[in-house]
Amino acid sequence: MNYETTVDLSDTENGMTLDEQAARRKRMWVVLAIVLAGALIAALMFSRGEEEVPFAAEGRETIPAVTVVSPGAGTLEGVINATGTLAARREMPVGVTGEGGRVVSVAVEPGDWVNAGQVLAVIDRSVQSQQANAQAAQIEVAQADANLAQANLDRAMQLVERGFISQADIDRLTATRDAAVARVAVARAQLAERRARNAQLNIVAPAAGLVLTREVEPGQTVSAGSGVLFSIARGGEMELLAQIGEAELAEIGLGATGRVTPVGTDESFACQVWQKSPVINEQTRQGTARCALPYNAALRPGGFASIELASETVVAPRLPESAVLSDDRGNYVYIIDDTNHVVRRPVELGMIRDDGIVIASGLTGDERVVMRAGGFLSEGEEVRPVTEAAD
């Protein structure tokens, strides 16, 4: 009896076909290859990392190297930087000094130079001129009366010797003559007063200087209550009203020199402190140093400017900003002691200059000060100092 055996290729173990088993084996080889590659890379990285971290002969990590400097103590000229407003050093307000009237003409413009007594504006004086003429005529009238009184007295003196006129008549005629002479003096004084008033009708410069402002035009009626018509900077002199902190203001002496740079220009001008404010502003804690400047067209009153002022010289160490650290305990630096360990040293800062920070106290200048990376160090840490030459 013959049996026919049929093999179904789709029947395999676990119910999987041959194709599915082949795909499974392929995935397993891929995963195995990835794992082996990862292990190889990790081994390489671990071996390189060990080479980059050398050990000392005794098994300790390498001591870090830090750059240090011994700054010494030099003589430093103090410099104080401040800002302020430009102004005329002596500004002269000019207004009406006489009785005023209608302005006929104005002879100057802002920016003009004027001399002492130069006419700035002319006021109509037609009425006042007639008054002066009337006063002159009064002098002639008074003089005629005085001449007549003198003639009468002279005739009476000739008759008194003959007894025709009494001494009382002589006294009366003498008094009449004296009164007439006095009226002549009064008339002359009145004319002089009138002429002086007429001279004040012209508005003139009280001193030589630079005209800053003009507040009057022809045809305008002015009087003593019209206020300031012109302002003049006497001699053209300017100044900077520098606002300086009270501590720094005390360091500046009268006669101190500086350089003023107006806003909008790179040009600077020499100045000299001629006055310091005796009062400190309660809100800003600043005072004013008045710095005199010669005339220059670039110096405009009301403009803003910066100033560098020379202050007292000091003998102190100077460090770069990178060497000075700060925290809630104050300012400090790290120095390296004789055993090459890090030591914290509190310091008091002085002037801040372009070339570094002046150390007012806390250092003698002979210490080895950490210049950089102080924030990565800790107090008591051992380091290997590398000396850098001081500036």
Image: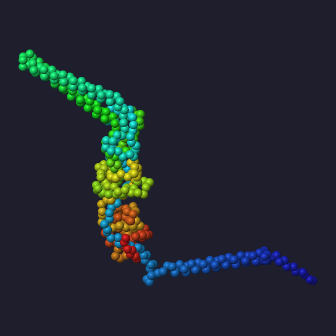
> Residue at 29% across / 26% down in the picture?
134
Residue 66, image x and y in percent? 41, 74
> Residue at 42% across / 75% down in the picture?
65
Residue 388, image x and y in percent? 39, 74
Which quarter of the picture shows residue 385? bottom left
> Residue at 67% across / 78% down in the picture?
33
Colour approach in the figure? rainbow
Q: Nearer the viewer, residue 244 or 95?
A: 95
Residue 329, image x and y in percent? 37, 62
Which quarter of the picture shows residue 35? bottom right
What is the total number of numbered labels drawn onto the structure image? 0
Q: Is residue 386 above or below residue 320?
A: below
Most extreme residue toward the top is 164
Q: Quadrant of the C terminus?
A: bottom left
Residue 220 shown left or right of residue 17 in the figure: left
Q: Nearer the viewer, residue 43 or 88?
A: 88
Q: Could one spot residue 255 in this view of the protein?
A: yes
Q: Nearer the viewer, residue 156 or 217?
A: 156
Q: Is residue 117 above or below residue 40?
A: above
Q: Is residue 353 above or below residue 105?
A: below
Which quarter of the picture shows residue 224? top left
Q: Nearer the viewer, residue 26 or 342?
A: 342
